[in-house]
Amino acid sequence: MTSLQARYASPAEIDRWDDLVAANPSGGDFLQVRGFATTKAAVGWTPRYLVFEEAGGGRVVSVSLVLERRIPTVGDYWYLPHGPAVRTTADLRAHAEALRDFLRDRARGVFAATLEPLVEDTEENRTRLDSGEHSLAALGARWRDGIQINTSTAIVDVDRDDDELLASFHKKCRNMISRATRDGVEIREYPATPETFAHMHRLMRLVGGGKAKLDLRSQAYTERFWRAFSDAGLGRFFGIDVDGAPAVMAYTIRVGERAFYKDGGSERPRTTPGMSNLLQWHMMRVQRDAGAKSYDLVGVPPRDRLDDPEYLNHSLAPFKLSFAREVTEFIGAYDLVMRPGAYSRWQRYGLRLAQRLHRGRYDDTGMY
């Protein structure tokens, strides 16, 4: 790959940031747009906007949102959610080199930067990144578990017509969609209002009969997220009413050619068979017609833990995989270490301290 350099985005680039994210090599990602930056800025992070371009000020290759945090007694920490926005190990190595050089020259207070690219987790890719031609270890990077819930996920290829898309689902899923259609179930879209938010909060808490192992963020955090994405025209609420009130609801996001099922919930006693299946089927087609080529159901257990009831979101996996059929796993994350002494303090106590302070100050489930 052509040698790269990194720089901060210009004001004009920040103004059209979401369009730049949508054009990234890895496709658009809701974790990199300004709405996500706004959400995180309210809970202690400082957003930075980074551009990777060909050396010498050439063509822009990708952009990445950076979240910066001051860690007491340690220094400045950078996190690139699903960044750099690349798919191959060669591109990841080139971006990591450019980031390392940028941190040395322009951000010397940063002791480490966590990269979390959407590179698939294969034996070949791990070998290349660990000790092969695209080694990140040679740059001082250390592997760690992925941070985001869709490090392992279920992704549906929606870049096909209705018949092909429907045929790709599991037979039981297709039958449920047919059942709800025969029953005359109607789907509606809801505005991003406090009333809609209240319905969503209630239904999300009732997932799995209210017994599912979930990790719901605070209502304030979630509503800030919904407002930011809805105001930007990226997020939409859909659902099904029963007796004049929502019984099933979902929130879906599209950034460029990638769409996501972000949040959802249902009240079992008020639903009929196939409602949730029909709702997903509807949202997939809406997002496809708007330009999406893939639809990420955002989070299932990795393949080797699909049968582990203790894994987060375990109970939702059968439903999500009835659409996608298989689990997609990404490589995880890498800490690009710039100051080994400070990084050692981060590992010993810095992260735990930062998490504890974050939860206490912001009533949030976790720092990330």
Image (cartoon, rainbow, N blue to C red):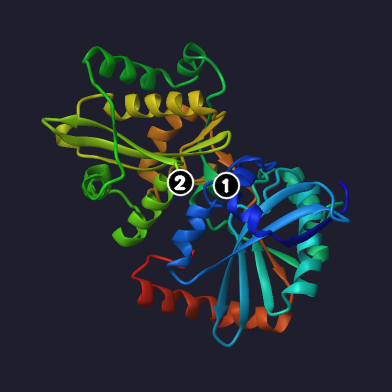
Q: Which mark is residue 195?
A: none
Earlier sequence position, callout 1 versus callout 2: 1
Residue bearing mark 1: 18
Q: Position of residue 326 (x, y in %)?
A: 53, 32
As drawn, 234 above or below 41: above
Q: What residue do we see at 15% from left, 30% from top? A: 242
Label 1 environment density (alpha carbons within 10 Å; few <14, some 14–19, many ≥20): many
Q: What residue do we see at 65% from left, 51% from top? A: 117
Q: Quadrant of residue 275?
A: top left
Callout 1: helix, strand or loop? Answer: helix
Q: Please, what is the three-letter code of the amino acid marked with disc 1?
A: Asp
- How many numbered badges does the structure rendering display? 2
Q: Please, what is the three-letter code of the amino acid marked with disc 2?
A: Ala
Q: What residue do we see at 42% from left, 74% from top? A: 358
Residue bearing mark 2: 232
Query: Left of 157 or right of it: where is 175?
Result: left
